[in-house]
Structures are given as C-alpha cells and as structure tokens.
Image: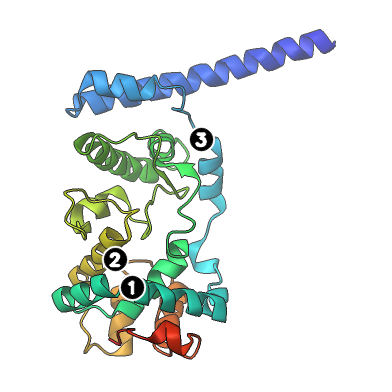
C-alpha cells in the first residue's frame, strides 16, 4: 500500500511539473511572438531558478490591501529612521524638491511604509511572480495585466543586461525601494545619480522616481489635504495607507527625535 501511495505521489508531482512546463511553454511562445529574442527567452525559462509559484496565486485569493493596518509606522523608531534618511540624502532631496516640488517628507514617509527605506524589498523573484501570474487560470484579468508587466520587466532586464533572477520584490511583482511595477519604472523611473542606469534599489534613483511619479499624478505643494490624498491614491489605493503617509510626513518635520549633533546641517524643506 505504501508503495502504491509513493507511486501515486510521484506520478502526481510529475504531472504537476509537466503542466507547469507546458504552461511556461505557451508563455514563451507568446513572448517570442510579441518580438522577444527566442534565444533570450529560452535561456531565461530553461534556467533552474525559473519556477511556477503556486503560493503567489494563493496569496492573491486572500490579500486585501484595504484591510492592512499601517499605524505601526508612526512610532518613534520609524520617525527617527526617516529623519536620519533625510539628512543622509539631503543633497538629493534638495535637487528633487527644486525639480519636482514634492515635499521630501512625503517621499520618505512613503518609502518607510513601502520597504522600510529599502531594508526589506521583498522575498519573491519578480520574474517568477509575473510569469506565474501571467499563466493563472484562476485570475484571468490579473493574468492579462501580469503578462503586460512581465513584458515590461523583460525589456528592463534585457536593456540593462541584468540577471532576472536577482531581482526580488513583492508577491505582486513590485520591486525596488519604492516598490514600482515594471510598467511604472518605464513611465516614472529616473536616473537620480546620473550613472546611466535606472536602478530602483539605488536610493538616489528611488527618491527621484517617486518624486516624478507624484508630480505626474498631480502633486503640488499648494494642494489641500484632500487633494493630496487623491494624488497619493494613485500610488496606493488604500485610504489607510494614504492617511498614514500624510500623518508620518508631518511627524518627520519635527526633529525632536534627533540630537543637536545629528540635526546639524539638516535641511528643512
């Protein structure tokens, strides 16, 4: 009986792998038909790190952004972290403020909530996430969206000759310090340090890219509180998220958590 069970288990695993390979084969055909180099696509999908991620599909079935509680980002630890960050990158923030007119405190608040200022950028391989979502039968609308994001991601890694398996992000495929989707990178990504590469894991690029995103979404310093909320909802559709960004940005303007030596040379915006 045990042998029969093991044979059944192995057979099931074999079928599952075959189905995943078959699905990725169809995905490869679509990408090649859409103009991607066949050798590059074959190379990516034949890589041992190329995997279907069923857990991503499962998360999608239960995840609700609007249900998340962001209040813990308002504690002193994150405020202190944010103020140090403002000081560390004050030259970049000054440049960004002049060019885009976006309050640096808003940018820092957003980056704190997204990735704790780049200290946690996600654990999922973006290539695998988008490939898995693109062949999802359960979420067909999401699959169509994911396929477009996958193409944007592939264009990005091919352009800059990047290892697609080295880029980690969220279960939705967002990546980098500001957690942009690949299409957002192409629309709003900026080369903040003028090194010729848009790298969302680079703080200068991330800061400028967020500023560009917000300005393109209608940000102006003279907007009312409600108007600012509408702009921030373009970044994340959760009103709880938006309210926390605004509240945290106000707390960041207060330098009481930094010592006099740490605030020396600190730029006020």
| CB within 8 Å, label 1 to label 2 | yes
Q: From this viewpoint, is residue 49 visible?
A: yes
Element at label 3:
loop
Q: Is residue 118 above or below residue 245?
A: above
Q: Foreground residue, 193 or 132? A: 193
Report the side of 183 relative to 23 (left or right).
left
Q: Nearer the viewer, residue 200 or 172?
A: 200
Residue at 24% over, 34% down: 161
Mark 2 vs 3, N-terminal side:
3
Task: Please provide percent x and percent y for residue 163.
Answer: 34, 34
Q: Residues within 10 Å of mark 3 (few under 14, many from 20)?
A: some
Q: Is residue 107 above or below residue 140?
A: below
Nearer to us: label 2 or label 3 = 2
Instruction: Say which residue appears at 46% left-offset and 22% top-offset.
Output: 48
Q: Nearer the viewer, mark 3 or mark 1?
A: 1
Q: Which residue is mark 1?
A: 107
**Secondary structure of the residue carrying numbered label 2:** helix
Please say if the residues under marks 2 and 3 sit with CB atoms less than 8 Å apart: no
First along the sequence among labels 3 and 1: 3
Query: For mark 1, does the 10 Å Cα neighbourhood hold few (<14), some (14 to 19), or many (20 or more) residues?
Result: many
Instruction: Name the spot of residue 37 as percent of width and height, x first.
Output: 20, 23
Residue occupying the far right of the picture: 1
Could you say which quadrant of the image residue 221 lies in?
bottom left
Quadrant, the C terminus: bottom left
Please tell me the numbered disc located at residue 53: 3
Sequence order check, earlier mark of 1 and 2: 1
Instruction: Find the distance from the CA under tag 2 to the CA under tag 3.
Output: 31 Å
Q: Is residue 75 above or below residue 134?
A: below
**Residue underneath mark 2:** 207
Q: Mark 1 falls on what kind of element?
A: helix
User: Residue 247, position in %: x, y?
Assistant: 44, 84
């Amino acid at each position: 009986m045990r042998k029969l069970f093991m044979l059944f288990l192995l057979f099931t695993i074999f079928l599952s792998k075959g189905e995943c390979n078959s699905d990725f084969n169809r995905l490869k055909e679509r990408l090649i038909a859409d103009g991607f180099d066949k050798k590059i696509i074959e190379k990516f999908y034949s890589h041992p790190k190329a995997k279907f991620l069923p857990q991503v599909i499962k998360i999608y079935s239960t995840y609700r952004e609007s249900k998340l509680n962001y209040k813990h980002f308002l504690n002193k630890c994150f405020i202190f972290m944010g103020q140090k960050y403002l000081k560390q990158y004050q030259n970049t923030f000054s440049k960004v403020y002049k060019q885009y007119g976006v309050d640096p405190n808003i940018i820092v608040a957003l980056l704190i909530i997204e990735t704790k200022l780049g200290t946690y950028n996600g654990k999922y391989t973006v290539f695998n996430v988008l490939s898995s979502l693109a062949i999802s039968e359960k979420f067909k609308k999401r699959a169509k969206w994911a396929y477009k994001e996958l193409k944007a991601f592939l264009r990005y890694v091919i352009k800059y000759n990047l290892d697609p398996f080295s880029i980690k992000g969220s279960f939705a495929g967002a990546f980098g310090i500001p957690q942009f989707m690949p299409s957002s990178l192409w629309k709003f990504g900026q080369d903040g340090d003028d090194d010729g590469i848009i790298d969302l894991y680079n703080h200068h690029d991330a800061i400028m890219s967020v500023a560009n995103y917000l300005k393109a979404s209608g940000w102006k310093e003279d907007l009312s509180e409600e108007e600012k909320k509408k702009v921030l909802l373009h970044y994340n559709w959760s009103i709880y998220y938006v309210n926390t960004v605004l509240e945290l940005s106000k707390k960041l303007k207060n330098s009481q958590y930094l010592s006099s030596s740490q605030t020396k040379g600190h730029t006020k915006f």
